[in-house]
Image: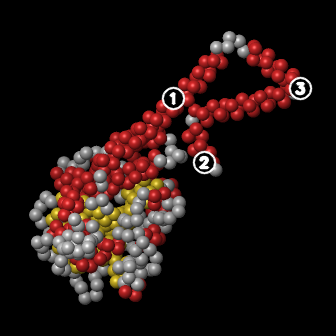
Amino acid sequence: MAEVQINNYIIKIIGLLGDINPKKDFPLFLKSGYKKDLSPVDELGNSDIKKEQFLRDYFYPNFRKIMFLDDTQSGTYRFIKHGFDSPGLLYPQKFPEEKKIPYHLSILSSEIFVFEENFAFFSVSIKINPIVGDTLLSTIDLSNFLSVVRNFNTLTTANIEWHEWLSKYVLCNMPLRGPGVKADEYSGSKFKLFTVIDLKDQIDDRAHLLYDLATSSPLGSASGKTFSSPDPNYYQELFQNRIAVFTNWEALALFDSMTCVGKGQITNQWQYDTWDQTYFRIYMYRLFFKYTLYKYNSAIHSEEEDTVKLRDQFEKFLNRYNISHISFNFLANEIFKKVGSALELESELVSFRETINNLSKTIQEEKQARTNLLLQAVTVLTSITSIGPIFEVLSQFEQYLGWSDSVFYTVLSILILTLGFGVLYFLVPEKLQAIWKKKA
């Protein structure tokens, strides 16, 4: 594929912060320069009434409040910061360091999204600094850059890995990987990518370029017969989630990326903001839903979790966030639908719901069986018409042992308490085990 120049572009990487502590982390965000994002603002930082009205005209109330307006009463927060150091990323990773190309970049902004139950995500908006002598970025350099900016372990010119650099210089030293980082269990090894490319000229094989950039394949893969070229059936399967509404651009939603290629779709500020904010937050919302399913899937297999309680929390989550349509506008709903399809949200949701309901049903049945057994024992005891014979037996046993009343009844009390604990453990073993592990 021939090299093509690019007029304008948007690159955002999205990652998972996981569960955070608002009392500790919110002041840390604000101290490091992040500001709360409660509503759209103009260039001077004042509330933009026109933008707010656009959101009301465009999105349904529940979605626009969660993703764009002040929803702090429901536990949803957004933070944004502009102005960061400029690192460099080395390409390609497999080459010796002296043979790698440094791609220097500028970080325009970083956003932190905190949803209910303090489940947090971040995004970083990036520009590639022009190579000396070049005025426009080429598709070759963009392809090279996208292949490394998404990887956690890409080496920076600061000689530390990319995820470490972001943690230290962008995310207030909050780790993204390693022991004790719970989010690392289901974040994978790559950041998600949101990319919009406005080409200088229209090209005939735009769909092939879209495939190559969306999948981080070498340029020419989709149209050639190289080792990385896709099987025709696989190519068609991926393009089921293609979004093609207007003739000047087309987009492709995949499992780990959302990519748009066209000409003239981000030539002015309104168009740029539409992709950079409006459509991007649709993608972010779907990722939040996907990662939350990961979180519940991980928790359901943990011995420390109460499955019935988890099921109730999950149903509450679905009641608030599992929405079928978000907008009065067809294009926003189309993006929402295609991204959800690419992430396989519906099938995973059905499967997980079935799993958690079956597990909670099994646990309830086991608890009921234990309770029934205990009730039978209580029935036998209460069938005794008088407790007099019991005291008589205890008195005879005390005389047989030759113990004093204080010693005998102290030992008896300990035995009764031990028996009571045993009965409690018999009825709710998982709760006692969870308490024991927390104290340990």
In the image, residue 311 above or below residue 17: above
The dot on residue 201 is none
Of residue 145 and residue 237, the one placed in the foreground of this image is 237
User: Which quadrant: the N terminus?
Assistant: bottom left
Disc 3 packing (10 Å; few <14; some 14–19; many ≥20): few
The dot on residue 402 is 3
Query: Which residue is at a point 41% across and 69% down the rendered structure image?
Result: 152
- Name the residue beneath numbered marker 2: 437
> Callout 2, which amino acid?
Lys
- Name the residue beneath numbered marker 1: 368
In the image, residue 119 above or below residue 170: above
Picture quadrant of residue 403: top right
Q: Earlier in the sequence, mark 1 or mark 3?
A: 1
Apparent side of residue 405 relative to residue 322 in the rendered image (left or right)? right
Of residue 165 and residue 186, the one placed in the foreground of this image is 186
Q: Earlier in the sequence, mark 2 or mark 3?
A: 3
> Callout 3, which amino acid?
Gly
How far apart are labels 1 and 2 at the CA level? 25 Å
Q: Earlier in the sequence, mark 1 or mark 2?
A: 1
